[in-house]
Image (tube, rainbow, N blue to C red):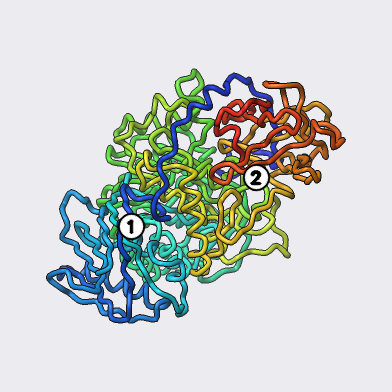
Amino acid sequence: MRSSHRRGRRLVALATAVAALPLTATLSQAAAAPPAPAPAPYALVPQPVSQQAVAGAGFTLTAQTRIAVLSRDSAAVGVGTYLAKLLAPATGYDLAVVKDTRVPKNAVVLDPDGPKSLGAEGYTLTSDEHGVVVRAHGAEGLFRGVQTLRQLLPAAVESRSEQTRAWTVPPAKISDSPRYEYRGVMLDVARRFYPVAQVKRYIDEAAAYKINTLHLHLTDDQGWRLAIDAVPDLTKVGASTQSGFTGGSDWYYSAADYKEIVSYASSRFMTVVPEIDGPGHTEAALASVPGLNCDDKAKAPYSGFDVGISLYCLEDGTHIGNTRRFLAAVIKEVAKLTPGPYIHLGGDETPQATPEQYAAYVKAATSAATGRNKTVMGWHQLGQSAIPADSILQYWGEDDDRESIGTAEETRSIREVRNGVAQGAKFVMSPSDHAYLDMKYDVSTPYGLSWSGYVPVQRSYEWDPATSTAKPDGTGAVVPAKKIAGVEAALWADRAYEGSNALPTPTTRWPEPQDYADYMSFPRLPALAEVGWSPQSARDWNSFRQRLAQQGPRWTAAGIGYYAAPGIPWPGVVKTVEGAHSVETGGKALDNPGGSTSDGTEPVLWSPNRGANQTWTFTPQGDGTYTMLNKSSGKCAEATGGAGAAVVQRTCDNQTGQRWRITPADNDRYTIAAAGSGLLLTAASATNGAKVTQQPDTGSTLQRWSVD
Ligand code: ACM
């Protein structure tokens, strides 16, 4: 059974088996990290381009406050109405939205006639005791600015019931615009069907973080989710299954449903990208349309968990013709229902297709799309065939691909990307080991998969789209910076149930799709939103996690069931050093390699997963020191020798060598000093396999550990 891998070129064992790597990096290299930017005055996500706290009292909303739109433009007035509705439940105010010609007092002013230099989405926001002014060049920029205004108000503003408190916007001066024009999120409504109301809810959640594109993965092996008039069986037959479910009759969007989603998204300045995946991931179509199969027999509807099982028949002229006519009919209707410029044609995971068959699909699909004046999008595999020069490819490779760049053995993905670049394509970056929201956060995550490794929040945050197709040292980017359209977070749903390390059973608990989406997206979607919006120079993990923590109460107020991920200083969560922890520095965790039970094994750094071999129990010894016991071995961390000497694990004896002094440092970090020598637990670098020794305090961040 292949169920353990989807989109899977890499199988990752759930307990990390750690291979020893060459230990080349030195402490002095690591200590040369650039200084962190100054802390931001306000906890905004994504971080604006510039913000200043200004002196003064701030502006307190009252029932008499007006939302004044300095324009007759209906879209701008629409943003005013949106803001009034947003504020109504928690404040209890029914704020008047008025068209005005000048800036009145006691108002939130929305001015869409700001300078063109602000661009489509840029805005400025100023607030003082008289009111708030959001200025943009058009309604879209106002909408983005309103999301910032929302975060300047108390968290309780997100509540759906009336709260009694002062609604004060602190005095501020903000100027902002996005790094990338495309900032998307993908919902896999094919494996797991999200009812319209749940899609709309998710649109609102994403729009709060300035996401501007909703990619709907509408078709896959397990379901076809959009009614097509010309081919009614696609939803009569092809929508009767989901991953793990059979017998459905309404697991699809009618044209009216789809229009409702598109129009709701548009009211949140979000473009819908419909994906009709092919030539693989097509079992639902093959179950609905006999002529798409080489034997002209419909397949049985599929509700399983395998990947790479299906292919349109592209073996002979007759069947290529069938596929071409089918795609033309489907894409004609999808194009008609979709006001946005894009149609996504999939193209991923087609193990059985010959290059000729794959090319026949790409030709049929791309000509149907361009014939309807749509810009082609596709997974980066589409680059292996001829595509229109203005296509946008979605890169979903991982660090293994980057490591192959410039070597004799570049991965297939990198070659496909090169081919796409050569044809003129632009790229949206969704590296699976940073941007796939269905990857588990860590070993404790009940849902999802881990074939691209675990993706804790820090990993979803700490990457740069500009170097996501570059060598590990950041040079040699295969996709040039000017060809990067943006970033997309992808929430697949092939394992949207509890206990997803195994196949589901009749007693498996399946959360509502929206609850799965909340848990996997929050807090990682806001991290990816900042990757897409904020300048790289304004991004810093320590600043981000502090700002992110302040979003937690907003999600609680809004009823978003987020994962209170470790390493984020969530308000109200009291931290103690005593107990079991992941001990991390530089985004890596202190790891007992392979869960060794031998005396003398030296812990190293490894990608965090919160597994037993990365769990260290701190036990107070009564003299202000602690022992650190590894959960997989039951052995204690021990200091050997003097400066530069290794740290090892050994049978616990509670002697001085196994006692550690844990002292708070900046940013919720700690130094961990050997009780005997005072030397600090020190990582040689922030790479997998890095050696951990005892060193004098150099101030290095690799001597400052989070203990969460
Ligand atoms: C993919 O993850 N198969 C695009």
Please give left or right for residue 159 compared with residue 367 in the image: right
Mark carried by residue 271: 1
Q: Spot the residue most to the front.
A: 623
Q: Tell me: residue 419, above or below residue 73.
A: above
Give the x, y percent position of residue 393: 38, 41
Residue at 24% from the left image edge and 72% from the top image edge: 107
What's the residue at 54%, 57% (across, down)?
191
Q: Would the CB of label 2 be found within 8 Å of ligand 1?
A: no
Q: Which residue is mark 2?
A: 707
Q: Quick one: SS at disc 2? A: strand
| Residue 572 in view here | yes
The first of marks 2 and 1 along the sequence is 1
Measuring 86% from the left and 34% from the top, which residue is drawn there?
Answer: 651
**Three-letter amino acid code at the position of disc 2:** Val
Q: Secondary structure at mark 1?
A: strand
Mark 2 vs mark 1: give the one in front.
2
Task: From the top left corner, tell me how far across and down residue 6 is, in percent.
Answer: 58, 45
Along the line of sight, which residue is nearer the eye, 146 or 325? 146
Which amino acid is tagged 1? Thr
Residue at screen point 36% across, 32% down: 479
Q: Residues within 10 Å of mark 2 (few under 14, many from 20)?
A: many
